[in-house]
Structures are given as C-alpha cells and as structure tokens.
Image (cartoon, rainbow, N blue to C red):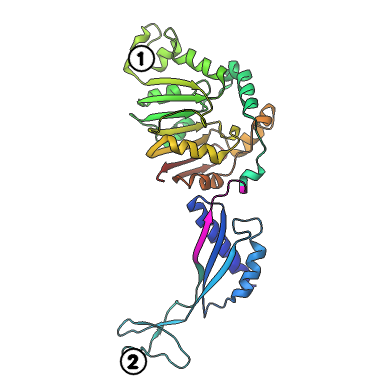
C-alpha cells in the first residue's frame, strides 16, 4: 500500500506546482524513482491513474526515470554508483559512504496548462450580463442605504490592495462609489470607477461629480458649506458605465480593486486576464469581500441567485491569478475574503 500513498503524494505535489504556475491540467508527469526507494513504477502507475480521477492529474501521461543508488567518497568527494560487491571510489579507491541518492521518488518534470473549460468553471452556472444589468439597475436606488460599513474590514482590504498615496486606481464594479471616500482619504492620484449598471453609475456621478453635492465636498475634504471648486486640489475621479471586459481602458493602473462583486462575473478567468492587461508591471489586483464565503453564498441564494455564482476558494482563485500574478495575500476567514497579487507576467 505504500505505492498508493506515494502516488497520492505525487498528485498533491503536482497540484501545488500547477497552483504556482496558474495551471489546472497536467498533461505529462515524469517521476524520478531511485533503485532503493522501495517503489515499483508499474504499481505506482496503477494507483496513480486511480487516485488522479477528479484532480489536475486526471488523464496525465505518467513516465519514469530510474536512478542508481549512489555512494560518496569521503576522501575525494566523488559521487559514484553502487554496484554489487563494488563500494570503492573509482578515483582513489576509498570505500564510499551511503547517500540519499537512489532512495527518492519525486517529480522529475511536468508538462501542464490552463484549460478554461475544466475545473471550477464547470461548476459555474451561466450568467447573462443583461440579467446582471437589470438586477443592479433595479436595486441601485437603495444600494447606499443597504450598505453596512465595518471600518476594520475596509482598512484591512485597502491595506492588502496597496491603496496608498499617489496610486492610480481602477475600481471594477464600483457600484455607487462606496469606496471612493476611502481612496480620497488615502490620497490616491486618481480613481476610475467602472460598472455595468447605468443606474449605479448615475448615482455615483451625482454623489461625487455634481458640483453642488455635499457628499462630494465632504468626500474630498471640503466642508459642506464651501465651494466645490476645492475638489481640484484632491483626487481625480471619473465613472464609466461599461462592461469592464470590453471597455477601452488604459494599461497603466497601479491598483485594481474588485470589491463585493466577483461572483457576478460569468467568466472569472477572462476577467482576471483582462484586468491583468489593465495593470502596469508591478501593479496589484485585489478581489475582496467584507464577509465570509459561507455568508456571501447564503446572501446570494436569495434574489441575487440568478446573477451570482458561488465564491470559489481562495486557493482556486489564487490558481487563476497565477497566470499573471504572484499572490502574496490569501485570506478566507469568518470575517472576510481577500486574494491579492502583484503582476509579474
């Protein structure tokens, strides 16, 4: 049975490598099996094919490269293969000492790729963007009143997202601009809010771009009774009603935020690909929710069910990020959910 456990360990190792690469399918896996490992490749393969079902390794071609037991000379440090009744160094004749070489079973190399049509995408139901627009247009008028702000969570999310003075922010599915005052308070250089709902964007523009809006003045550090021209000293803000996956946006943002919106996007892989293209090298993408996966899925089981998918695990989302980003923040607790990474590819 040790071959079964060994096969499972190789599958788990392959899954870790896929996660690092941003892939979800292994096409070929070559094992390195030492002569003294105690593993028989044919038996390992039989167990591997069985245990791989339902994993990234399902259907993978499994091959092997076998290695000799090696000894090391204590005098001249030569590494040489052990042979029957032959233990002496071929260079100086000194008896060799045992090493771990030849006792291992590990992955020698792996061919893998990202295949959009498998994995988590299979379990996601189709979402019509027209339905998303209609749903959020209908609830836009009551959106701000329904918001529950928890300052510690907002602070943690903004910190993880790299929202600091001077950065250029792309706020995806910005809604009515719930995070705009926070961006301004942190003195970002600019904010571009994009939302597919026309009614959400109308409210955001009324709040922050209308010259006589007290909320605009307050959010920009102006007293309500002062002239709104004082906003010129602060953050540049613009709102765009558009599908972010189709919008003609620049590719020089420092920060991209998707806050409390990710389950409403039909194709997560495409979304992340597009957002990666909008960030400069070294820019940061953050997908975050101020509640747990369980709470969010329960919340979306009601009227929003038609326009929502379940929130994937932080590990699965990090795997999607991996094609473009180095993920350095993964949080999934009973309080919040954050996955964030720096664009490196």
Query: Which residue lies at the image location 57% right of the left edge and 59% below the top edge?
Result: 27
Please indicate, yes or no, whether residue 175 appears anywhere in the rendered image. yes
Within-10-Å neighbours for mark 2: few <14, some 14–19, many 20+? few
Q: Which residue position is annotated with label 1?
A: 231
In magenta segment, residue 115: yes
For marks 2 and 1 on the same chain, the one whose residue lies earlier in the sequence? 2
Q: Would you identify the image quadrant in which residue 285 lies?
A: top left
Q: Would you identify the image quadrant in which residue 231 lies?
A: top left
Please indicate, yes or no, whether residue 179 appears anywhere in the rendered image. no
185 and 167: which is toward the camera: 167
Q: Which residue position is annotated with label 2?
A: 93
Query: Which residue lies at the image location 69% right of the left edge and 32% below the top edge?
Result: 301
Query: Which residue lies at the image location 41% right of the left edge and 25% below the top edge?
Result: 191
- Tell me if residue 170 comes above or below residue 116 in the rendering: above
- Tell me if residue 148 comes above or below residue 267 in the rendering: above
Q: Would you identify the image quadrant in which residue 10 lies?
A: bottom right
Total of numbered circles in the picture? 2
Marks 2 and 1, Cα distance to the nearest angstrom?
Answer: 84 Å
Q: Secondary structure at mark 2?
A: loop
First to last magenta residue range:
108-119
In magenta segment, residue 96: no
In the image, taking residue 130 as reference, residue 239 lies left or right, namely left
Expressed as whole percent of the image width and height from the top left, the position of residue 178 reads: 50, 23
Expressed as whole percent of the image width and height from the top left, the position of residue 5 reads: 61, 68
């Amino acid at each position: 049975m040790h071959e079964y456990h060994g096969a499972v360990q190789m599958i788990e190792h392959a899954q870790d490598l896929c996660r690092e690469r941003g892939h979800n399918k292994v096409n070929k896996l070559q094992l390195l099996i030492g002569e003294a490992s105690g593993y028989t490749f044919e038996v390992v393969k039989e167990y591997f094919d069985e245990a791989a079902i339902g994993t990234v390794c399902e259907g993978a071609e499994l091959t092997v490269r076998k290695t000799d037991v090696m000894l090391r000379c204590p005098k001249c440090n030569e590494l040489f293969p052990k042979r029957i009744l032959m233990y002496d160094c071929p260079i100086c004749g000194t008896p060799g000492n045992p090493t771990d070489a030849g006792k291992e079973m590990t992955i020698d190399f792996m061919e893998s790729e990202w295949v959009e049509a498998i994995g988590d995408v299979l379990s996601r139901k189709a979402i019509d963007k027209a339905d998303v627009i209609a749903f959020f247009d209908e609830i836009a008028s009551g959106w701000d009143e329904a918001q529950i702000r928890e300052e510690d969570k907002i602070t943690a999310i903004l910190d993880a997202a790299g929202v600091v003075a001077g950065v250029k922010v792309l706020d995806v599915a910005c809604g009515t601009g719930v995070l705009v005052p926070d961006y301004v308070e942190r003195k970002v250089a600019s904010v571009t809010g994009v939302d597919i709902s026309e009614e959400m964007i109308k409210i955001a523009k009324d709040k922050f771009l209308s010259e006589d809006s007290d909320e605009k003045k307050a959010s920009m550090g102006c007293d309500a009774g002062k002239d709104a021209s004082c906003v010129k000293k602060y953050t540049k803000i613009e709102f765009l009603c558009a599908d972010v996956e189709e919008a003609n946006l620049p590719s020089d943002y420092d920060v991209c935020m998707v806050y409390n919106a990710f389950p409403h996007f039909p194709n997560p892989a495409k979304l992340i690909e597009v957002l990666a293209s909008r960030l400069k090298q070294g820019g940061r993408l953050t997908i975050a929710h101020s509640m747990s996966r369980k709470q969010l899925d329960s919340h979306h089981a009601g009227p929003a069910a038609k326009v929502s998918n379940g929130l994937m695990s932080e590990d699965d989302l990090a795997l999607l990020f991996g094609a473009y980003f180095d993920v350095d923040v993964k949080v999934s607790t009973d309080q919040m959910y954050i996955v964030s990474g720096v664009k490196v590819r």
